[in-house]
Amino acid sequence: MAKRILTGDRPTGPLHLGHYVGSLQNRVKLQHEYDTYLLIADVQALTDNFEHPERLEANIVQVALDYLAVGIDPNRTKIVIQSMVPEITELTTYFMNLVTVATLERNPTVKEEIKQRNFTRGVPVGFWSYPISQAADITIFKADLVPVGEDQLPMIEQAREIVRRFNGLYAPVLIEPQPRLGAVARLPGTDGGAKMSKSLNNCIYLGDSSEQVRKRVMSMYTDPNRIRPTDPGRVEGNPVFTYHDVFNPNKAEVEELKQRYRAGTVGDVEVKEKLFHALEQILGPIREERNRYAGQPEMVREVLVEGTRQGREVANETMRQVRDAMGINYRFDPQVIRLTNMGFSANRDHNWLIVNSLSGAEEDNIAVCSRCGLTRSAHEGKVRVFRLKRNSFHQIDSFMHEGMVVVDMRITKSNPCQPPKKPINFEEIKNLATSQSDQLL
Ligand code: ATP
Ligand code: MG
């Protein structure tokens, strides 16, 4: 089986250049090698935006457009909406028992983000504990690899710790994920801040118009000590030059600009003009693709629905294994307790087992004769309940484990019990009962 990738973004706004070099480029490249899932983490976005849930829906579409625009192929990559996979919430709850308060308090990224966000009413528990839910995001998809920016490294470490704890305590069903950093682990903001971040309003967005990009570049933070173009300037820690290093493929031009900047023979405007030009080479084609997809909202919606459907399948399977591992796979179905069978009489020669349906209603059940394999729906006959004959117990026992019920059913003589022509496939019969139940539920 191909190795798997899970990574994602919070729909707190459209994606920016930091995402592009921090993670998106890797995802586009690796989607050919890995079974890739991209999670649009709307539940996580709520942790610091719970007062504005109405913004999520539009932002989900914005993020999806960004994915498609940079070359995420919806035929390869599954784009999954987090809230539509509620199993993640269940896993988060189980994981909460495996992490201490002290560990959460040590997470350096969360500490930094708490400072930046200035929570006026204290830090919400949801935000503070998001490393746990993120561990559930990653592990429910059994991801081997997580392409992320540097700020996310403590989250991957937290996820790895949880997996080790879970696997050691219960059973080894979860996978320890590895991080993969992008070409630039942490792109600074246009304000010179340590990280370009949607929540900090210091971004150049992938969908920005040409004029917006120019405006954002022209108002970028540079060297604050440089008043005139003739003053010698600092290149180090100057985000305009950091961006030149990252985005301008003309290395000779960048070197020349740096020298002239240091010598005080070039103005900010010229340096920024050249940066704008370099960025446009990258953003122009992305913008065009983005506009193309924005004109096909129905297609984007389908991509999200289908990706989420496939993602949920994987999540469901993992949760089955998780519950098995923890030994919490019990079902107290009332039908299992109804253990009954027939006595003898001339017109009653089948030994009916009832495969119980999930609806729990007797008339939705399927009856199968344990001797000849004849099946029929239970409501075709009149169901009467008798006590099970002693010597049938061991034979019936295994069916009971599968949640089957044994009852007696009166039938006519037209279907006499005969030895089966082929072995009875109880598995098939059980599936039949399950699919019938699905329709009924
Ligand atoms: P928010 O401010 O809402 O947290 P964000 O800009 O930090 O938004 P996220 O959705 O939190 O974006 O991050 C998604 C992914 O992009 C993560 O893997 C993160 O490491 C990466 N990433 C975000 N910003 C940068 C950046 N400036 N440089 C490199 N990678 C980044
Ligand atoms: Mg973030």
Image: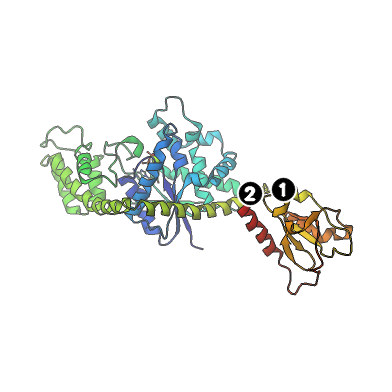
Task: Decide: is 253 above or below 195.
Answer: below
Q: Mark 2 points at which residue?
A: 323
Residue at image mark 1: 333
Give how far across and how far down residue 74 sits, in percent. 40, 57
Question: Does residue 163 appear to the left or right of 197 in the view shown?
Answer: right
Which mark sits nearer the N-terminus, 1 or 2?
2
* Image coords of residue 45 (percent x, y): 43, 39
Can the viewer see residue 133 in this picture?
yes
Image x and y of residue 134, in percent: 49, 43
Q: Say what secondary structure mark 1 lies in.
A: loop
Where residue 87 sits in the image (x, y, percent)? Answer: 55, 46
Residue at the (45%, 24%) spot, across then down: 121
Type of residue at label 2? Arg
- The amino acid pointed to by label 1 is Asp
Which numbered disc covers residue 256? none
In the image, is residue 16 above or below residue 75? above
Number of marks drawn? 2
Mark 1 neighbour density, 10 Å: few (under 14) some (14–19) many (20 or more): few
Residue at 82% of width from left, 67% of height from top?
413
Report whether residue 21 is seen: no
Q: Which of marks 1 and 2 is in front?
A: 1
Colour scheme:
rainbow
